[in-house]
Amino acid sequence: MTRNGGEQQHSNSTGATGAIRAGTTGLLFVMPALVLYAAFVLWPLGSSVYYSMTDWDGIGQAHWIGLANFERAFSDKIHLASYLHVTLYILGTLVFEVSFGLIMAVLLDSDRSGFALLRALFFSPVVLSMSAAGVLWTFVFDYRTGIINASLKELGLADWAQPWLSQPGTALFCVMLVSGWKFAGLYMILFFAALRRIPRHLYEAARLEGAGAGWCFFNVTLPLLKQNILVAVLLAVTGGFAGFDLFFTMTNGQPYNSTEVPATWIMKQAFDNDQLGYGIALTVILTAVVCLISLIYLRYAERSHVVEY
């Protein structure tokens, strides 16, 4: 019994030593990544939180003012309105990017001649930079020389010509359209890849039962694409909050701050007005909002039913 007990104790000791060595070895392997993560993520985050509580112009001495920047942010009418604008913009992107991308993927889900070329053409705006797309469409929407107003005048609809980017009623909608033109092709490719994983015999069985194209779409395609749609919506929402390039190049938050979004207002406060401390505070608020929305959405996605096929 004593011998067996000693052997068992020795075995436990050997196992514990091996586990410690394995843990130490693993820690050494991940240490470079941890150092880089701390240097380029944790340290900047901590610095941002600190400077968000200071009155700092980015050059001189930072003066501690506590939560004054955050109190100012929640009383800043333009800042609060920017979240309404970005919410409307995100809803627009869900229609013009995700929904149109899904429709194009379904319509072009074929190996027939010419469909690959069409998919490539619809995807081509994705490779164009956001700034270039914004500048290009600024000329398209120009009141005097833009192709839209010129076409309306040629068709005898001169009364319909509008200063599209210079009036609050149409400026934000124009940015939504350009964003849809830019990214619908990306979601088309994502959904197209997912469609190719759906077994074709499911559609064949449905057609044998007399189901039409509409029934197959709503009862076969959409349920099997649920997880892909959830991911696409998350990308559109987080990308919408990060939207800056199109707004900066097309409207710069105008007219009358009607297209101001958090990113553009942060840039103006931090760099145009030399209030970097306040701009960082706005960035901290934006980061917290995006993280909260992402966590809630991911929690919902985890609880959603996964359709296997």
Image (cartoon, helix red, strand yellow):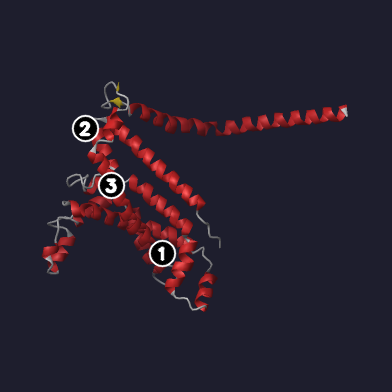
Q: Which is nearer the N-term, disc 3 or disc 1?
A: 3
Asked where in the image residue 103 lies, by quadrant, the reply is bottom left
User: Dot 2 corresponds to which residue?
Assistant: 273
> For numbered disc 1, what is the local secondary structure?
helix
> For numbered disc 3, what is the local secondary structure?
helix
Q: Residue at x 15, y 61 (%)?
A: 149
Q: Is residue 92 above or below residue 273?
A: below
Per the model, the C-alpha gap separating discs 2 and 3 is 23 Å
Q: Residue 84, which numbered label?
A: 3
Q: Residue 2, which numbered label?
A: none
Given residues 233 and 26, the one toward you in this image is 233
Q: Residue at x 25, y 47 (%)?
A: 247
Given residues 207 and 36, the one toward you in this image is 207
User: Dot 1 corresponds to which residue?
Assistant: 105
Callout 2: few (<14), some (14-19), or many (20+) C-alpha neighbours within 10 Å?
few
Specify the quadrant that holds the C terminus.
bottom right
Given residues 199 and 78, the one toward you in this image is 78
Q: Is residue 224 left or right of residue 118?
A: right
Expressed as whole percent of the image width and height from the top left, the position of residue 122 reads 35, 62
Q: Which is nearer the N-term, disc 2 or disc 3?
A: 3
Q: Amino acid at mark 1?
A: Ala
Q: Amino acid at mark 2?
A: Asn
